[in-house]
Image (cartoon, rainbow, N blue to C red):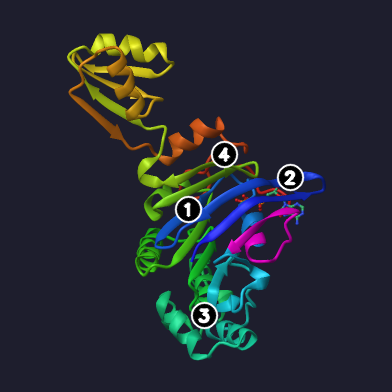
Amino acid sequence: MKIQVRGLTKAFGGRRVVDGLTFEVEPAAVTGFLGPNGAGKTTTLRMLLGLVAPDSGSATVDGRPYAELPDPGRTIGAALEATGFHPARTGRDHLAVLCTVHGFDRRRADEALETVGLAEAARRRVGGYSQGMRQRLALAAALLGDPEVLVLDEPSNGLDPEGIAWLRQFLRTWADAGRTVLVSSHLLSEMEQLVDRVVIIDRGRLVHAGPLAHLPGGQVSVHSPQAEALRTALEATGARTHRTRPDALTVTGLPCAEIGRLAHRHRIELHELTPESGDLETLFFTLTGGGSGSGSGTGNGIGIGAGSREGK
Ligand SMILES: Nc1ncnc2c1ncn2[C@@H]1O[C@H](COP(=O)(O)OP(=O)(O)OP(=O)(O)O)[C@@H](O)[C@H]1O
């Protein structure tokens, strides 16, 4: 099932926090939803889940807005925040209550706890859970309806490296089964390990969407016996070059096809043209000019312009 977001817009107090946002999330892939703190990720997800009404535009799953899904609980599962658990309840009781509320078989509670690796802690009170265990419990809650589509807001927050490795494997298996998953984060370095595709937003607007493997902003390595002539031609277009050998350059700021076209136009012989995939950090800073937040990274990864969390 596909998630489709079309012209989605939402303003709070006259300020647009989601601004004409359009993107799609395909099944059978893990899609990262990335942007600095306050970029509008959570608001977008809340609109997708029918928790906030858009001012204009739409967010649909399988072609329908949440409110019109015939069986929303079995279509889309979401973990928006790993908070709001009753501390005196056990993990198992928490899920059992949700099963009752949503009309799911109570056996799903134990199955979901098993899936997220919380079976042994199931009968302990949530008040004693670590942040990572709460994340797993929130994920278990999202899985109760055995949905086709999973939406996770910052699921790696509070997970230790072992937890991250587990999450990566879980998401991989999920996508390999042909299901859809959208995972939001402001931690680029972690997402790079977790996702196949990215949707990057900043100030409520789309900055970039596409496969992780084809990120722009990376470098291209070029071998040519006329490296100096090529360098002159490239720099005239504004691309940055670095001579690595007498017959080799790395080029930043132009894709392979453009470099090949330019070389052809100047009758420059090429022996090799190799893209070196960009990384998310380079991409983000290239596309947004450094992000809208302030301050440095937070948590155990590198944050995208991770400033303070506003208005929460
Ligand atoms: N109900 C609300 N009323 C007023 N302002 C809101 C409301 N919900 C969100 N905002 C504001 O909208 C902006 C976008 O917030 P949102 O939580 O969607 O961003 P985010 O990208 O998810 O950020 P984070 O990574 O911090 O969760 C923020 O400035 C936030 O303060």
Q: What residue type is labelled 3?
A: Leu
Residue at mark 3 to residue at mark 1: CA–CA distance = 22 Å
Residue placed under numbered mark 4 in the picture: 305
Of marks 4 and 1, the one in the foreground: 1
Residue placed under numbered mark 2 in the picture: 16
User: Tag on residue 144?
Assistant: 3
Of marks 2 and 4, the one in the foreground: 2
* Residue 33 as seen in the image, left or right of residue 102: left
Q: Which amino acid does label 4 sit on?
A: Gly
**Helix, strand or loop status at disc 1:** strand
**Is residue 292 shown to the viewer in this render?**
yes
Mark 3 vs mark 4: which is more N-terminal? 3
Quadrant including the C terminus: bottom right
- Image: magenta residue range: 47-60
Q: Does the residue labelled 4 lie within 8 Å of ligand 1?
A: no
Mark 2 vs mark 4: which is more N-terminal? 2
Residue at mark 2 to residue at mark 4: CA–CA distance = 19 Å
Residue placed under numbered mark 1 in the picture: 32
